[in-house]
Image (cartoon, coloured by chain):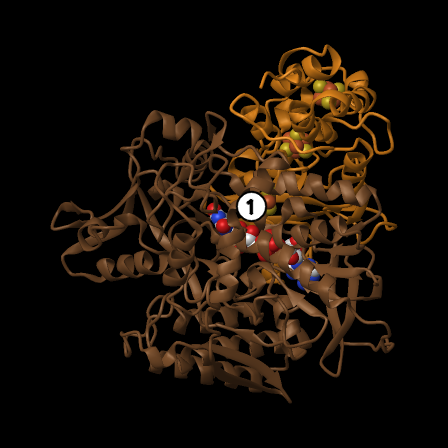
Chain colours: A brown, B orange
């Protein structure tokens, strides 16, 4: 088998590389920057798995049910089934490579997280992503030294080598030297979320420019659930981005309130007596949006963490406290802090089946760039899990399918590679924001759609810019097509969830046009 | 407030560096060096003090919240993260001099090639050779040492580090501390040997590196722990289970 080409060195890419190496298969691990700088290091709150260490009688079936319900039944049930069944093993594997999860009596402790009735989230204080990444990077290095992993940071995906719906490799540019090379072999895309469509409005990294997604879309790779953007309820504005206040803050007891008639109104607790402040993110964000609009409410929504114990601040949320003091000049231990929704996660992405295959043969995908696990809303703590398990699953599928023996040779044609202009990126962002916010409707979506089409027709755009426009149109079209409310997609003109729409919307780019269609979600196989 | 940014420019790895001065205005006392660089690049119409349009300034960033180490550079003579350095705090009489890290080859402008850091981690075998779980006792050290950003600020100020030297500097101390803390027996012996060769024996213990570490890694503490386990073979190296 030729070396497998992995695009992206976050949790999904690393997990794929390690799995291939463990099976003696070589890979090239390409990324724009070293793994240490990938978005995965920003994850704070934790990773889910029904380890059942808290005496709450938890099991993987509960995890399955919460994940499906949280995603309002748009996720692939068989994919979620394997994800949740394998979750405890993934966390144990992480522990065995030396991840210092918080423990008590040498057993992993779990915390509450949104949308889950049981404590199911393993964590390393409030820097879980960074700490897990560190161990995964070290583990991968072992195979690098053995010559099984060829780590190539500062390398950008320029093109997939596709012919007749088969992907034979990648064209890659070394951004330090400008040298372009082709690498033949099966491809796993692990290139993260489409942050670059929303500069300054996101909690994630600038590195995930969205270019890889736009490129793949333009080359005929199908995407799904593009209308599903996750707004995280608790973020704070800092220069050039939104800074996340982890859900763990509420998991450990933080409470949301707004001032109503001069008094603190803990609206989530009143409206949702069971899960209270820990309802899924889509619900919390929407409620915040609505209470701010109420006439008798005033000001921002606040997150009140003043009731948390000294132990929580010291051993569970130390980094968070330091961060808030640094950016807001306020100590959350003493004062409630104002919070606002921010774009945090892309449930939509490359359309993959439970084996992580795409519509293009020899192209697989894993991590935040894919769409099968989280449906209409991702639960906190499920995405690191999805990235690590997904990377592994994709690698196993690659091994099962055993690649190709012969490949066509691709010409090194000269193509327009000028970077997208910032003004164009911002124009597209603003059009998207005008219509794809927390509350949507027919009119604003239609306006945005035509504005974007007119803009594209009236400007001389570079290839990279054109691709961005196409993917943005697919996002808006998906939101227009879904004439119901489900998860993160809330339509004020269709406020109810409608079973007719319990399908995914698949977008594709064909002959210069964006096409969308509804597709059935597979049935869950009977459990043995 | 108006700042004079003096930026060290260099077209590519082989061309001559030159200083470009730009007057940059902001009312916001929280404006970071990263914000200024982004704004100048995104705007595209900034002129330097000689009236020349400022071409795209090459620099690296990713998280913009001091968690990834991408944006390390030398700001008014000190290695720092651009996203964690406010103009209002770092300026000297309104002047902010911005240069690339000097211990690494320049790719262009403020972008440097830090590959040597990762090569050194490979050379010192910074990984666990067998399965080791951290427990209540080792958790804290393993946690602290996992926080290193691999930014390279510590290497910039270290008198004993240069690219290609046998001494690898504090950017290997942090990852190796986790390895040493968790490993046992033969694995610990092997890790200790490389630790001594590539870190311990070359470090003058001036702790200049600690002062500049943006992740505030407690270098003292890691040193004491790692030396105890790897060099003196005491302490948590011999774990009781
Ligand atoms: C602030 C924050 C907190 C979070 N907290 C949690 C949490 O507590 N629990 C949880 O489960 N999840 C959390 N998440 C989400 C989670 O961190 C991510 O979804 C997950 O880490 C994604 O991993 P990934 O491997 O798919 O992508 P990433 O880690 O984003 O990696 C993407 C990789 O692709 C590469 N790449 C991108 N474009 C290109 C290109 N054109 N060419 C080559 N390479 C490219 C990048 O260089 C990078 O290496 C959080 C996210 C954020 C932003
Ligand atoms: S203590 Fe001094 S010699 Fe040792 S790594 Fe730090 S700066 Fe270098
Ligand atoms: S020890 Fe500190 S200064 Fe050195 S690379 Fe790590 S984070 Fe940067
Ligand atoms: S951009 Fe990540 S540390 Fe500055």
**Residue A154 visible to the viewer:** yes
Does the beta carbon at disc 1 come under 8 Å from ligand 1? no
Decide if residue A235 is on the left or right side of residue B207.
left
The structure residue drawn at horizontal position 48% and vertical position 54%, both measured from the top left corner, is A84
Residue A501: x, y in percent? 38, 79
Residue B72 appears in which quarter of the rendering? top right
Residue A203 lies, in percent from the top left, at 48, 53
Frontmost residue, A195 versus B128? B128
Q: In this view, does A70 lie to the left or right of A173?
A: left
Q: Is residue B114 visible?
A: no
Q: Is residue A125 above or below residue A231?
A: above
Numbered disc total: 1
* In the depicted structure, whether residue A344 falls above or below residue A456: above
Q: How crowded is mark 1: few (under 14 residues within 10 Å), some or many (20 or more)?
A: some
Q: In this view, does A199 lie to the left or right of A249?
A: right
Q: Which residue is drawn at 75% across and 42% down?
A: A141
| Residue B236 x, y percent position in the rendering | 62, 16
Q: Where is residue A209 shown, x and y percent of the image? A: 61, 62
In the rendered view, would you say A424 is above or below B1? Answer: below
State which image quarter holds ligand 1: bottom right
A510 or A458, which lies in front? A510
Give me the chain letter of mark 1: A
Q: Mark 1 points at which residue?
A: A89
Label 1, secondary structure: give it. Answer: helix
């Amino acid at each position: 088998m030729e070396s497998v080409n992995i695009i992206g060195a976050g949790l999904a890419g690393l997990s794929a590389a390690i799995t291939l190496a463990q099976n003696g298969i070589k890979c090239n691990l390409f990324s724009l920057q070293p793994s240490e700088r990938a978005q995965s290091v920003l994850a704070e709150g934790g990773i889910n798995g029904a380890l059942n260490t808290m005496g709450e009688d938890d099991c993987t079936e509960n995890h399955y049910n919460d994940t499906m319900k949280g995603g309002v039944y748009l996720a692939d049930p068989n994919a979620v089934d394997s994800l949740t069944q394998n979750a405890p093993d993934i966390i144990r594997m992480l522990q065995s490579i030396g991840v210092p999860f918080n423990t008590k009596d040498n057993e992993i402790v779990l915390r509450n997280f949104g949308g889950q009735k049981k404590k199911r989230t393993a964590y390393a204080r409030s820097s879980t992503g960074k700490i897990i990444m560190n161990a995964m990077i070290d583990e991968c290095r072992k195979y690098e030294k053995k010559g099984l992993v060829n780590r190539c940071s500062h390398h950008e995906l320029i093109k997939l080598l596709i012919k007749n719906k088969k992907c034979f490799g990648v064209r890659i540019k070394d951004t330090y030297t400008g040298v372009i090379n082709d690498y033949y072999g099966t491809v796993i895309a692990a290139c993260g979320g489409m942050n670059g469509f929303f500069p300054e409005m996101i909690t994630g990294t600038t590195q995930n420019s969205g270019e890889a997604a736009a490129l793949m879309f333009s080359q005929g790779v199908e995407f799904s659930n593009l209308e599903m953007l996750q707004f995280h309820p608790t973020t704070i504005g800092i220069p050039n981005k939104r800074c996340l206040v982890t859900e763990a803050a509420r998991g450990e007891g933080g409470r949301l309130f707004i001032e109503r008639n001069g008094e603190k109104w803990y609206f989530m607790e009143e409206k949702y007596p069971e899960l209270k402040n820990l309802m899924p993110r889509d619900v919390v964000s929407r409620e915040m949006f609505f209470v701010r609009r109420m006439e008798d409410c005033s000001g921002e929504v606040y997150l009140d963490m003043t009731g948390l114990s000294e132990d929580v601040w010291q051993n569970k949320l130390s980094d968070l406290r330091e961060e808030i003091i640094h950016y807001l000049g306020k100590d959350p231990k003493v004062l409630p802090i104002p919070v606002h929704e921010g774009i945090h996660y892309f449930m939509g992405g490359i359309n993959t089946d439970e084996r992580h295959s795409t519509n293009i043969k020899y192209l697989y995908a894993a991590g935040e760039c894919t769409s099968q696990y989280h449906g209409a809303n991702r639960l906190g703590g499920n995405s690191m899990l999805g990235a690590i398990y997904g990377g592994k699953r994709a690698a196993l599928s690659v091994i099962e399918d055993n690649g190709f023996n012969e490949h066509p040779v691709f010409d090194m044609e000269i193509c327009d590679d000028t970077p997208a202009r910032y003004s164009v990126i911002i124009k597209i962002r603003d059009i998207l924001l005008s219509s794809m916010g927390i509350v949507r409707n027919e009119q604003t979506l239609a306006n945005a759609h035509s504005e974007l089409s007119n803009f594209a027709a009236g400007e001389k755009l570079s290839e990279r810019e054109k691709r961005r426009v196409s993917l943005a149109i697919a996002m808006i079209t998906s939101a227009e097509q879904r004439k119901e409310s489900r998860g993160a997609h809330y339509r004020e003109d269709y406020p109810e969830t409608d079973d007719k729409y319990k399908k995914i919307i698949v977008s594709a780019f064909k002959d210069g046009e964006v096409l969308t269609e509804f597709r059935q979600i597979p049935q869950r196989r009977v459990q043995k | 407030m108006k700042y004079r940014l003096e930026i060290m420019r260099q077209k590519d790895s082989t061309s001559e560096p030159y200083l470009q001065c730009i007057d940059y205005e902001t009312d916001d006392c929280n404006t970071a060096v990263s914000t200024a660089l982004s704004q100048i690049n995104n705007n595209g119409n900034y002129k330097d003090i000689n009236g020349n349009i400022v071409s795209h300034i090459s620099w690296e960033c990713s998280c913009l919240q001091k968690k990834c180490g991408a944006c390390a550079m030398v700001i008014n003579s000190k290695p720092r993260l651009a996203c964690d350095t406010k103009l209002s705090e770092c300026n000297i009489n309104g002047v902010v001099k911005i240069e690339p890290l000097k211990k690494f080859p320049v790719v262009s402008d403020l972008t440097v090639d830090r590959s040597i850091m990762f090569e050194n981690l490979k050379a010192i075998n910074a990984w666990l050779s067998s399965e080791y779980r951290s427990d209540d006792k080792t958790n804290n050290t393993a946690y602290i040492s996992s926080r290193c950003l691999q930014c390279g600020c510590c290497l910039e100020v270290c008198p004993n580090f240069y690219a290609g030297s046998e001494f690898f500097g504090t950017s290997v101390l942090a990852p190796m501390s986790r390895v040493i803390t968790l490993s046992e027996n033969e694995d610990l012996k092997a890790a200790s040997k490389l630790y001594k060769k590539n870190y311990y024996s070359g470090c003058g213990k001036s702790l200049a590196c600690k002062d500049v570490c943006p992740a505030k890694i407690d270098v003292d503490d890691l040193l004491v722990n790692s030396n105890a386990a790897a060099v003196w073979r005491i302490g948590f190296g011999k774990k009781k289970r």
